[in-house]
Amino acid sequence: MIKFFRNPEVRENLIIYLLLSLAASLAAWLYDGKFGLFTLLLCMVFTSLHLLFTYMRYKKISELSADLDTILHSGGSLPLEKYAEGELSILQSEISKMTVRLREQQQQLLDDKVLLADSLADISHQIRTPLTSINLLVSMLSEPNLSDEQRIRLSNELFGLLSRIEWLITALLKISKLDAGTVTFKKEDIPLQELLNRSVSPLLIPMELRGQALTISAEGSFTGDISWTCEALGNIIKNCMEHTPDAGNIRISAIENPLFTEIIITDDGTGISKADLPHIFERFYKGENSNDKSFGIGLALARTIISAQNGSIKAENLPEKGARFTIRFYQGTI
């Protein structure tokens, strides 16, 4: 109770009520002594009731403050059912929203910390393997009795490993930009045939060396960021190429309709194992059929790019053999 009267607002209200009561009582006393006494008693009753209701309201606010302090410092939940009247009901509703939002943000921060730690561990592991090989190759290249033929072979291997690390770092930087939302996707129109030709252009020579046949059939046009989309499609086609045997076939078809632009990429390779199928678009995930040069980042980058452009991607196995990737870029929001 002493703390209650220490509140400046309570003291100011009490002084105002007392002055008004004295003024009203004095005016009534001048008119008639009995009215003056009645007015004084009535004012005292109203003042007491006001103080009582104010005290009860401040007590509930104090309890609410204590409950919030408990949540902030020791966890637990807020017993909101105690605050279900008047202005406290509005305050309770806002505090409830704030509590839920703060807990969601806290959980998101914890999830982000776990994801960051896992990502750093994965990146360290992915880079450590080629770095170990690079150190070994450098030590071998320093041998004085090494022949020119061996030196050229080791240099080519060294160049390949450095290229792999460069590609990984570049891909990770691209994913980081996409995650941070700093990438602005352009809206460009291009025929689907030209888009697919640009996407497969860097892979034509490796396919030719493998004796793989590429078939492209496209009708219509595509609206979106050409550069980023070529990056995504190129990663998917590269994955199909790596899992298709020599002299195999890779087929790409694309159509446009009023709802979406659809691109289907199929191969007659080994397909995707049932255990890998739910995870192939996860970062750093390497399936059981992946080779040693795979980082498990290409398909994850492709999905991120496609999703950011209001698209979807689905992977499945063909009934006979091989895999199929179905990409759709929707004309409207899905």
Image (cartoon, rainbow, N blue to C red):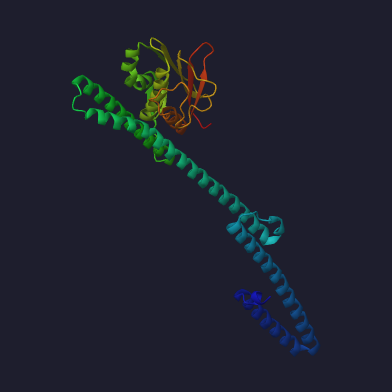
Kindly identify the residue that appears in the image at 62 percent across and 59 percent down.
70
Above or below: residue 141 compared with residue 32: above
- Percent of width and height locating residue 263: 45, 20
Kindly identify the residue that appears in the image at 77 percent across and 86 percent down.
36
Q: Quadrant of the image for the N terminus?
A: bottom right
Above or below: residue 77 compared with residue 247: below
Viewer-closest of 196 and 104: 104
- Residue 13 visible to the viewer: no
Q: Give the number of marks.
A: 0
Viewer-closest of 315 and 73: 73
- Residue 291 visible to the viewer: yes
Viewer-closest of 223 and 93: 93
Q: From the viewer's perspective, is 294 left or right of 2? A: left
Kindly identify the residue that appears in the image at 74 percent across and 77 percent down.
48
Q: From this viewpoint, which residue is outermost toward the right?
A: 34
- Percent of width and height locating residue 305: 43, 31
Quarter of the rendering containing residue 213: top left
Viewer-closest of 303 and 55: 303
Quarter of the rendering containing residue 238: top left
Kindly identify the residue that appears in the image at 78 percent across and 82 percent down.
41
Q: From this viewpoint, which residue is outermost toward the front?
A: 145
- Percent of width and height locating residue 65: 62, 63
- Percent of width and height locating residue 177: 39, 39
Q: From the viewer's perspective, is 129 left or right of 84? A: left
